[in-house]
Image (tube, rainbow, N blue to C red):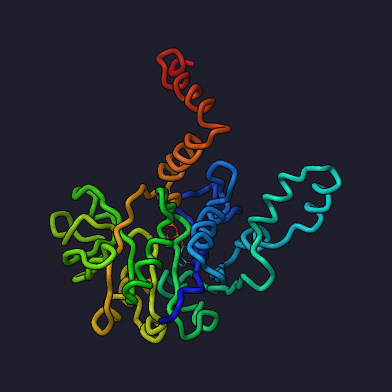
Amino acid sequence: MRRIRKAVFPVAGLGTRFLPATKAIPKEMLTVVDRPVIQHVVDEARAAGIEHLIFVTGRNKGAIEDHFDQGYELERTLAERGKLRELEELRRDSPKAGETSFTRQQAPLGLGHAVWCAREIVGDEPFAVLLPDMLHHGREPCLKGMIDAFEAQPSNIIAVSEVPMSETHQYGILGVGPPGRRGLMPVNSMVEKPPQGTAPSNLMVSGRYILEPGVFSILETQPRGAGGEIQLTDAMITLARARPFNAFRFEGRIFDTGTKLGFLAANLAYALERPDLGPALRDELRAILSPAGQKR
Ligand code: UTP
């Protein structure tokens, strides 16, 4: 059986829902507490045993490459000033030489196109895709659970999370059969943003995928779909006609940090669980929410 060694991070999107913050700063570099969003997602991939990180970038995304580079001058200054804890943390977060690849999506033609741009670096092996906007907050890292399930039952796997039925029209939704080994559910249908009342379930596609390399040849010739973009969902629908596809239910909370509300909620959730920040932040929130705080 082939191991999942490589993960693709499509980071070429324009982030228009988060303007003006994203005019000059990639949305993936906005911080949830004190770590860029992309670092949280890379942490998840590394916790799942991923060895090679592939970033599909675009214009104005240079800060992401700098973030995952070694900050030689910074590290030397920290060492000289005796800031050894900070130095240790930076070194722990930095991927080692040769563990990252960066490729450019020259035009934002859609998520499917961004994934296709990684084909030469991925090669002929199954791989993971993580959408960096979508933070998966739970006891077990989402991708780790998916890879464990893949090892028990190799197939294409899409992570899903439950949403209220009234919100299904905003998301990609999967229709599934009863759960089998490791809780994997066979996928019967995939629909992008189903009109109200037509969704096959309330299971939202949450932005984590394990895909077989056959998806690349499908994307190669796939016409543009919804929004004039080359859609990953369309390629997966084609792949699912020939290959097994399963859904993996993530038992945690999803924060869409590509939206302002999701980003704010993620900051609160991640900060509140931190021993160094949580108690003081709780006090701040109480003060802000008190009638006196609201009048200020
Ligand atoms: P989004 O739908 O969040 O699009 O893409 P976006 O452009 O980043 O953000 P908005 O909608 O304008 O606010 C989902 C994921 O696919 C990547 C994005 O970077 C994000 O991680 N993506 C999307 C690409 O890499 N290239 C594309 O052409 C489109």
- The vertical placement of 240 against 246, above or below, is below
User: Which residue is pictured at 25% across the width and 61% down the height?
Assistant: 173
In the image, taking residue 192 as reference, residue 256 lies left or right, namely right
Q: Position of residue 240 (x, y in %)?
A: 26, 78
Query: Residue drawn 38% across and 61% down?
Result: 145
Residue 96 location, quadrant: bottom right
Query: Which residue is situated farthest in the right direction here?
Result: 80
Instruction: Assign ligand 1 to one image quadrant.
Output: bottom left
Q: Quadrant of residue 111?
A: bottom left
- Counting from the top left corner in percent of width and height, residue 296 is at 49, 16
Q: How many marks can you see?
A: 0
**Extreme residue toward the left, this view:** 197
Q: Position of residue 100 (x, y in %)?
A: 61, 70
Q: Which quarter of the rendering shows the N terminus?
A: bottom left
The vertical placement of 202 against 109, above or below, is above
Residue 5 left/right relative to 172: right
Considering depth in this image, is 102 or 188 the residue closer to the camera?
188
Farthest residue, direction top: 292
Residue ID at (23%, 64%): 174
Residue shown at the point (21%, 55%) measured from the top left? 202
| In this rendering, position of residue 159 left or right of residue 66 | left
Instruction: Give the answer, above or below, for where 260 lies relative to 240.
Output: above
Question: Looking at the image, which is closer to me, 201 or 105?
Answer: 201
